[in-house]
Image (cartoon, grey):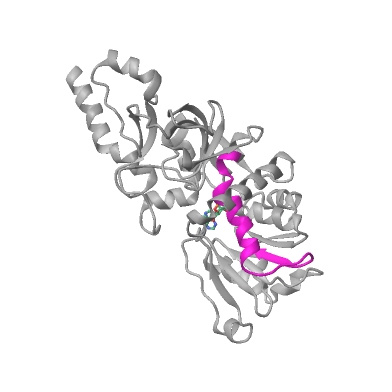
């Protein structure tokens, strides 16, 4: 029995050693380990791992990982919270995502944690500081992470942990997409589908802060009026369900709002066509997600007579290392807006031990749900 346990753990360690960027040390002699543990080893960690790509609810499991040795520039972070984003799911599925960690891998890409221990040469962090990986890095769905200090960005501890955990992937994308494609001025308008997503909620609020109107498209659902009201409270000018847009003259719905010069598409299929229909002559649609897993189709006439431009955005590519400093400033600004009560979105904190429930919700198995954020 004893040797089976040792073999099992050893095997887990062996098969998952590439999961961590520092070598996990298998505790052969408990006495030695206890002494070393105080100064150089992280606590053992629990992690969501997948050894092959496939449906996330079938290929992921929670395993125990042994302690990791801290090098002199390493920081050991006790994770507090990490979201389940659509891209995390895509990476596990493995088919579409161009950059993903080699398997076996630990899930998750962004999150927030508290400094638990630091290596002997670490000067800029103290125990108890809150940090996020910035740029984000793979493997945030685990209770303890050991990575070099340069990976971590210290943030304000007054921010609710669920916002600190989710500030990079979606809010930063919303911010960049509003800035980088079309020069918008106060009084202009944008149009977007997937308006209930975190990116969508962020676009509404960041646009409103800049005096830009937003035209929003959501899926039909029971309780759509309630959802529309929620988005309007965030600053949405108008919100339409897809079925409301099955009309000949979509622009007739604009009323006093200007025709938008910029549109955002994270769905594909018909909802992408609705975005295109709203756009003005020479307008641009930026595709950044494909939630419906359907292609974007564009009529020939909208190219010829409207001269529309189709662009794409991918945050992971945008966040090159040269932009690391710039990104951290933007993140601090976004978290500042949260602290000032000017920026919010719907989240649900879920205990880590309920990972499978959170995953089912994130996979859409239980209908529309708020963003799932694991609380460790
Ligand atoms: N390119 C980039 O760099 C980048 C960066 C960040 C995010 N993204 C992408 O942006 C999108 C939104 O991410 P998020 O984290 O903000 O989303 P989220 O908060 O997790 O919300 C999911 C959104 O997808 C919608 N949705 C789910 N299944 C759908 C389906 N089958 N058809 C149509 N809509 C569906 C949901 O609508 P309901 O409310 O109706 O359920 C909700 O609006 C994702 O595609 C994500 O990959 C891309």
Quadrant of residue 50 in the image?
Answer: top left
**In the rendering, at what x and y percent does residue 319 appear?**
51, 55
Residue placed most toward the observer, 256 or 338? 338
Residue placed most toward the observer, 238 or 189? 189
The answer to whether residue 188 is magenta is: yes
**In the rendering, at what x and y percent does residue 338 appear?**
69, 42
Judge whether 233 appears above or below 116 on screen. Answer: below
**In the rendering, at what x and y percent does residue 286 appear?**
57, 67
Q: Is residue 197 visible?
A: no
Residue for point 60% across, 58% down: 194
**In the rendering, at what x and y percent does residue 270 appear?**
56, 68
Q: Residue furthest bottom?
A: 304
In the rendered structure, the answer to whether residue 31 lies left or right of residue 157 reads: left
> In this picture, which residue range is highlighted in magenta?
164-193
Judge whether 51 appears above or below 301 on screen. Answer: above
Give the position of the N terminus as an image quadrant: top left
Judge whether 308 appears above or below 239 on screen. Answer: below
């Amino acid at each position: 029995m004893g040797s089976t346990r040792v073999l099992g753990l050893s095997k887990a360690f062996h098969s998952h050693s590439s999961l961590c960027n520092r070598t996990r040390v298998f505790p052969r002699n408990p006495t030695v380990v206890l002494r070393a543990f105080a100064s150089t080893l992280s606590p053992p960690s629990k992690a969501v791992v997948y050894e092959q790509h496939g449906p996330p609810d079938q290929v992921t499991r929670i395993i125990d990982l042994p302690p990791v040795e801290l090098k002199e520039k390493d920081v050991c972070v006790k994770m507090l919270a990490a979201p389940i984003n659509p891209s995390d799911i895509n990476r596990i599925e493995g088919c579409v995502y161009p950059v993903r960690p080699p398997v076996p891998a630990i899930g998750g890409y962004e999150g927030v944690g508290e400094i638990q221990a630091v290596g002997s040469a670490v000067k800029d962090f103290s125990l108890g500081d809150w940090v996020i990986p910035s740029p984000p890095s793979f493997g945030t769905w685990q209770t303890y992470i050991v990575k070099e200090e340069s990976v971590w960005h210290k943030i304000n501890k007054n921010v609710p942990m669920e916002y600190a955990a989710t500030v990079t992937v979606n809010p930063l994308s919303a911010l960049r997409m509003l800035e980088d494609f079309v020069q918008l001025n106060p009084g202009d308008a944008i149009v977007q589908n997937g308006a209930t997503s975190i990116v969508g909620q962020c676009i509404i609020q960041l646009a409103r802060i800049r005096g830009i109107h937003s035209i929003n498209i959501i899926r039909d659902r029971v309780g759509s009026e309630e959802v529309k009201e929620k988005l309007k409270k965030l600053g949405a000018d108008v919100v339409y369900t897809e079925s409301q847009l099955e009309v000949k003259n979509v622009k007739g719905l604009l009323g006093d709002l200007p025709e938008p010069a910029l549109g955002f598409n994270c769905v594909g299929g018909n909802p992408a066509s609705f975005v295109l229909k709203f756009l003005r002559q020479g307008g641009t649609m930026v595709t950044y997600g494909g939630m419906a897993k359907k292609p974007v189709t564009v009529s020939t006439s909208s190219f010829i007579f409207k001269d529309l431009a189709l662009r794409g955005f991918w945050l992971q590519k945008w966040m090159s290392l040269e932009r690391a400093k710039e990104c951290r400033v933007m993140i601090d600004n976004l978290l500042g807006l949260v602290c000032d009560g000017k920026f919010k979105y719907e989240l649900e904190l879920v205990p880590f031990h309920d990972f499978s429930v959170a995953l089912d919700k994130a996979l859409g198995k239980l209908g529309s749900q708020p963003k799932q954020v694991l609380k460790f």
